[in-house]
Amino acid sequence: MIPGTSQFGICGPVVYRRCRDGDTVLVVGKNTDWPITVRLLDVWCPDGDRELNRAAVEYIQSIMTASYETVLFVPIEVRNNKPVLTSLVSFDRVLGYVHIGEYGTLNSMLIRKNLASSTKGGRLGE
């Protein structure tokens, strides 16, 4: 569990490798070669807006290549006191939050920079 949250999940240190698009990053587990493609939860960067997507990718690259401690948190949905493991993935991606040092999540940083919204089709920055 991430300190300060009530969510149950899997978490561990990761190292940034590359950005697929404005809401998906590729990381590896720290001290491993295990690639993990992460679809950032609660972040929607419109795929159809190439300029915005490019700006989001550039922002992600600038943040993720800096020397911050980075932790991946993958929440696990629980129903009837049992984990719902299908909530962990979407296509070939793990669904999660990337925590950047004491700055919060990459997810929320993208929204605060008006590069994404928190809902599909939502207003940027909200």
Image (tube, rainbow, N blue to C red):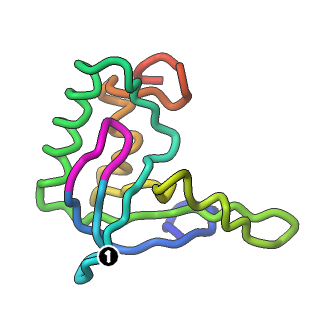
- Residue ID at (32%, 76%): 34
Q: Relative to 97, is 85 on the left or the right?
A: right
Most extreme residue toward the right, as rendered?
80
Residue 107: name its quadrant.
Answer: top left
Seen as rendered, the residue at the extreme front is: 91
Q: Is residue 43 above or below residue 68?
A: above
Residue 90 position within the rendered picture, expressed as x and y whole percent measured from the top left: 55, 52
Q: What x and y, as percent, mark residue 39?
A: 44, 49
Instruction: Point out residue 1 in the picture as x, y percentages from the top left corner.
Output: 55, 71
Which residue is painted at 58% across and 69% down in the image?
A: 9
| 8 to 98, vertically: above or below | below
Residue appearing at x 30%, y 38% in the figure: 21
- Label 1 belongs to which residue? 34
* Residue 66 position within the rendered picture, expressed as x and y whole percent measured from the top left: 12, 55
Label total for image: 1
Q: Residue at x 32, y 36 (%)?
A: 22
Relative to 73, does residue 13 appear above or below in the rendering? below
Label 1's element? Answer: loop
Main secondary structure of the magenta stretch: strand
Q: Is residue 101 magenta?
A: no
In magenta stretch: residue 24: yes
119, 86: nearer the viewer: 86
- Label 1 amino acid? Trp
Residue stretch rendered in magenta on the structure: 18-25
- Name which quarter of the figure residue 28 lies in: bottom left
Mark 1 neighbour density, 10 Å: few (under 14) some (14–19) many (20 or more): few
Please indicate whether residue 79 sits to the left or right of residue 39 in the image: right
From the viewer's perspective, is residue 119 above or below residue 3? above
